[in-house]
Amino acid sequence: MQNIGEPIEIEEDILENTLRPRKFKEYIGQEKTKDALRVFVEAAKIRKEPLEHILFYGPPGLGKTTLAHVMASETGSNLKITSGPAIERAGDLVSILTSLEESDIIFIDEIHRLGKVVEEILYPAMEDYAVDIVVGKGPGAKTLRVDLPKFTLIGATTRISLLSSPMRDRFGIIHALDFYSDDEIGKILERSSKILDIKIDQQSVKEIAKRARKTPRIANRLLKRVRDFATVYEQGVAGLDITSKALSDIGVDHLGLDETDRKYLSTLLHKFDGGPVGVETLSAATSIDRNTIEEVIEPYLMQIGFIKRTPKGRMTTPACDINFVPHQSNYGGAKTKENL
């Protein structure tokens, strides 16, 4: 596996890669998507052809990059990783494409952020396995077509609506990834705790799962922070008390909301009477950028039924009015109105 255009991995990235499944049997959740991908992989092996181009979309942290690793491992292919923002010029993409070998997989994260000129280079590459290179300038310029080995492009996006129709149409396989159940998150945490050699009981696993926003990446991040607290205070044993203290101290309440979520909801409730209010106004009022609001904060708040998007703007729901309190207790998560 090769990362393109990225700095040397820091410890947190290395840990994440250690926890990343490499085979379908290790990958927990997304059962329908996983079952379909198994079929596509087996069919490609039987035909001795590369996989069709694949697009995964959904909120951050649900396993899009992990699935790219799994697909590469299951097909025995080399995986090259880059992202839309990292490919600034058409020449950058041409350089990547011309370095590919037969049946390689290239993974482009945030593919919706590719520039228009760069995106147009991908069209013939995906359809005809060729790139057109312009040699020279002005009237004397010539177009040289360079053939590419057959490869598979796996794209990932949190904003499929921002992907152009011509780009979407060139993917033969498109799958949406959804949030995980608490049981699935619990299984992921059990697997991760074994890999990280963390002594943790079932109650603590359930507590982390409950606060992990139904997202594996967040679950593993919380597990690592609980491990830190357990190492300092409990000789490495993560019981329920230290788990609750750790999660409370890092600002994650019993609903999985952090300080940014609470700031968003408090602003919507108290400054705008629960809405409706436009996202740009919310961004200005909270000093949270629009992308973070739309891609990180709102998907989970909609999943738990706290907000809804309407043509007039964002609004809170009765569930939010009843269950959300912006303050966090010193121990064990957010207060509820019942125990105030």
Image (spheres, rainbow, N blue to C red):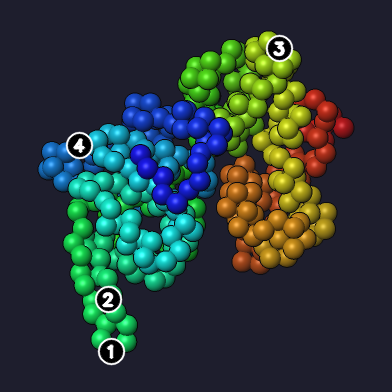
The answer to whether any part of residue 112 appears in the image is no
Is the C-beta separation of discs 4 and 2 under 8 Å?
no
Tell me the element at label 4.
helix
Kind of element beneath mark 3: loop
Alpha-carbon span between mark 1 and mark 3? 74 Å
Alpha carbon of mark 4 to alpha carbon of mark 3: how far? 47 Å
Q: Residue at x 21, y 58 (%)?
A: 148
Pair 4/2: label in front: 2
Write down the residue under mark 2: 135
Q: Work out whether mark 2 precedes mark 3 in sequence or the reverse, and give the earlier one.
A: 2
x then y, percent, for residue 142: 23, 80
Residue 67: x and y in percent read 38, 39
Location of mark 3 (residue): 234
Say which amino acid is labelled 2.
Val
The disc at residue 245 is: none
Query: From the viewer's perspective, is residue 296 above or below residue 289?
Result: above
In front: 317, or 277? 277
- Seen in the image, is 230 located left or right of residue 71? right
Which residue is located at x 76 percent, y 49 percent? 263
Res 252 → quadrant: top right
Q: What secondary structure is found at the residue carrying circle 1?
A: helix
Q: Which mark is residue 42?
A: 4
**Marks 2/3: CA–CA distance:** 66 Å
Q: Quadrant of the N terminus?
A: top left
Q: Is residue 232 above or below residue 173?
A: above
Amino acid type, callout 4: Glu
Q: CA distance from mark 1 to mark 2?
A: 11 Å
Amino acid type at image mark 1: Pro
Residue displayed at 55% across by 32% down: 11
User: How far is mark 4 from mark 2, CA to CA?
Assistant: 41 Å
Of labels 4 and 1, earlier in sequence is 4
Q: Tell us which disc is closer to us: 1 or 3.
A: 1
